[in-house]
Image (cartoon, rainbow, N blue to C red):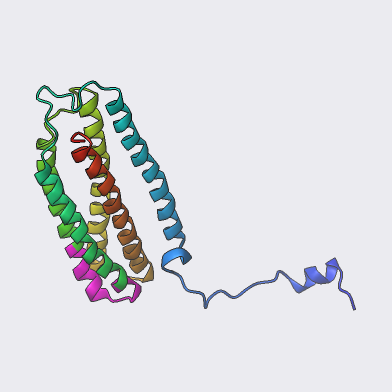
């Protein structure tokens, strides 16, 4: 026996019980993960364009660097910061794995370790700026070098702030599953901060030496 539109209206709207579904997820099952991937794609494009601009300017300059002494940036502080960033991946990976296991105590400890590495990097970054041997407004070389360094520093400051907020929230609460997912995504973004620094480091510190 077929049912017409009137019978369907009498039965009322069909509903689906989703109470048993999880309220959070990790990795590609999380909408936040996809948002993070989209942000990384956009910011990677910005970094790539900035690096392309550096080499475009270099190809049209008679002298590079365009400073009076023609002196490239000192390698010391940039190299130190590269090692700090690479080492910072260890506590971030520990935090990510602990978050996916909902291990609150380990998440707390590793987040503060991540924050310590980020602050150490920022402190050394201040010395990096003093060792560039050029001003941001001196010439095209100075402008693009400071732009590359400034862009990466801005991303680092953003993620340092995120890490600090997460660390405090994981201590003060309230702590729920979504907080653990945030910790996992924060680690993923930090990997991008580390990965994006490597071509910038090569460009700023060796682009003026080759």
Q: Residue furthest front?
A: 210
Residue that appears at 30% across and 32% down: 55
Q: Which percent across, then down, holds residue 107?
A: 25, 70
Q: Is residue 101 magenta?
A: yes
Q: Which percent across, then down, holds residue 179?
A: 34, 66
Q: Is residue 40 above or below residue 13?
A: above
Q: Is residue 117 above or below residue 79?
A: below
Q: Is residue 203 above or below residue 14?
A: above
Q: Which percent across, then down, holds residue 85?
A: 20, 55
Residue 112 horizontal side relative to residue 183, left or right: left
Is the stretch drawn in magenta largely helix, strand or loop?
Answer: helix
| Quadrant assignment, res 109 | bottom left
Question: Foreground residue, 10 or 153?
Answer: 153
Q: Check the picture and name the quadrant holding the N terminus.
A: bottom right
Residue that appears at 24% across and 48% down: 156
Q: Which percent across, then down, holds residue 115?
A: 19, 59
Which residues lie in the magenta part? 98-113
């Amino acid at each position: 026996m077929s049912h017409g539109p009137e019978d369907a209206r009498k039965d009322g709207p069909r509903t689906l019980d989703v109470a048993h579904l999880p309220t959070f997820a990790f990795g590609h099952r999380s909408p936040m993960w996809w948002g993070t991937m989209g942000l990384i794609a956009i910011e990677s494009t910005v970094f790539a364009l900035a690096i392309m601009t550096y080499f475009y300017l270099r190809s049209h300059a008679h002298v590079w660097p365009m400073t009076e002494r023609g002196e490239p940036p000192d390698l010391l502080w940039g190299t130190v910061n590269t090692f700090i960033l690479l080492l910072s991946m260890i506590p971030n990976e520990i935090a990510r794995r602990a978050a996916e296991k909902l291990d609150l105590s380990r998440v707390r400890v590793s987040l503060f370790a991540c924050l310590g590495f980020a602050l150490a990097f920022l402190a050394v970054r201040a010395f990096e700026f003093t060792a560039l041997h050029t001003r941001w407004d001196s010439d095209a070389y100075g402008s693009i070098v400071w732009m590359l360094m400034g862009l990466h520093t801005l991303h680092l400051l953003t993620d340092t702030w995120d890490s600090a907020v997460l660390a405090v929230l994981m201590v003060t609460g309230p702590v729920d599953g979504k907080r653990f997912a945030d910790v996992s995504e924060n680690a993923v973004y930090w990997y991008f901060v580390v990965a994006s620094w490597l071509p910038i480091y090569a460009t700023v510190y060796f682009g003026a030496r080759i």
